Amino acid sequence: MQKCWRSMGTVRLAGGDENSWAEAQEKLSAYKRRITMNPYLRAYMEKEFDAGKEAERVIEWLRDWFAKNGPDSPAVIGLSGGKDSTLVAALCVKALGKDRVFGVLMPDHVQSDLQVAKDIAEWLQIPYAIVDIGAATDGLKKCLKEAVHLETGCIPADREFVQGTAMLTNIPPRIRMTTLYAVAQSMNGRVSNNGNRSEKHVGYCTIYGDMAGDFSVISAFTVTEVIAIGEYLGIPDRFIHKDPSDGLTGKTDEDNFGFTYEELDTYILTGVCEKDEVKKKIEERYQRNLFKQSPMAAYRKNDRE
């Protein structure tokens, strides 16, 4: 059986300085030490999960899906610089060939890992475009802040659109999805959804933003499984072991959660959570965000109570 981890060398790519490279290697070593210490997750990955087999199944699924839903269409992928979009792009390249995969990089004025996203596209040898969505997000935020309540002539004090609220934070991912569909329509492409199972389980995603797409490649896989498949495909450590961040608030995913992906994935895959407070946080997030995972509720005129 293919194990989760295999011996990995270090790969130096263009675009990173010595400090960032050393930091990446330090984080990689820390991750390996942490994941190795968790016997439950390690046992699952070694005994239950075959990264090679799953990768080949996904590649065949992609070929079949595109044969039915876009035999001449490219896969259009939002490349964020993170491990999820990197793996999706790599799998699409394996399934369709590099000429049928198009990357779209979408900074909101600035993006700390924009160079990493460029490096990924160049490593995969796929064409890509950079679309700065900053003007679009600024324009919509300005319109919202200037909105006038029709009856009172102003926005009630408790309804002010304050910078940093969830409403404003989720504007960029929705504009990015609009951008992806505009690019896809220009080339009769199909838009990928890059969400993983771990994020979906706790609702760490934006409706009509990063939850949208024409096809979903890795939604059945936790972050730990995503890393395993990436290792199997030979994706450089710098990309597949990159610390996940939301790209919105400047925080890592784990900072926002209050628990680690290791703890989350262990609970999802094995049902084990050794910390009661972490288990409570995971279950609360899951219940609070169930509506995101369900089809849109709709009244049906023939329904009977």
Image: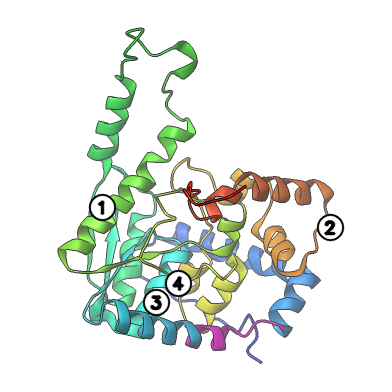
Residue tagged 4:
217
| Numbered disc in front, either 3 or 1 | 1
Crowding at mark 4 (Cα within 10 Å: few <14, some 14-19, many 20+): many
Instruction: Check the image and report above or below for 187 versus 144.
Output: below
Q: Give 49 or 13, whichever is nearer the viewer.
A: 49
* Residue 214 x, y percent position in the rendering: 35, 66
Q: Residue sitting at 25 percent across and 78 percent down?
A: 100
**Left or right: 135, with 269 as reference point:** left
* Residue 163 x, y percent position in the rendering: 42, 27
Q: Earlier in the sequence, mark 4 or mark 1?
A: 1
**Segment tinted magenta in the rendering:** 48-56
Secondary structure beneath label 4: loop
Q: Earlier in the sequence, mark 1 or mark 2?
A: 1
* Residue 194 x, y percent position in the rendering: 43, 63
Crowding at mark 2 (Cα within 10 Å: few <14, some 14-19, many 20+): few
Is the residue under label 1 in contact with that under label 4 (CB below 8 Å)?
no
| Numbered disc in front, either 1 or 2 | 1
Q: Earlier in the sequence, mark 2 or mark 4?
A: 4
Residue tagged 2:
274
How far apart, in angstroms, are the residues tagged by discs 4 and 1?
20 Å
Crowding at mark 3 (Cα within 10 Å: few <14, some 14-19, many 20+): many
Residue tagged 3:
90
Residue tagged 1:
179
How far apart, in angstroms, are the residues tagged by discs 4 and 3?
11 Å
How far apart, in angstroms, are the residues tagged by discs 2 and 3?
35 Å
Q: Earlier in the sequence, mark 3 or mark 1?
A: 3
Counting labels gives 4
Name the amino acid type tagged 1: Thr
| Numbered disc in front, either 4 or 3 | 4
How far apart, in angstroms, are the residues tagged by discs 3 and 1?
21 Å
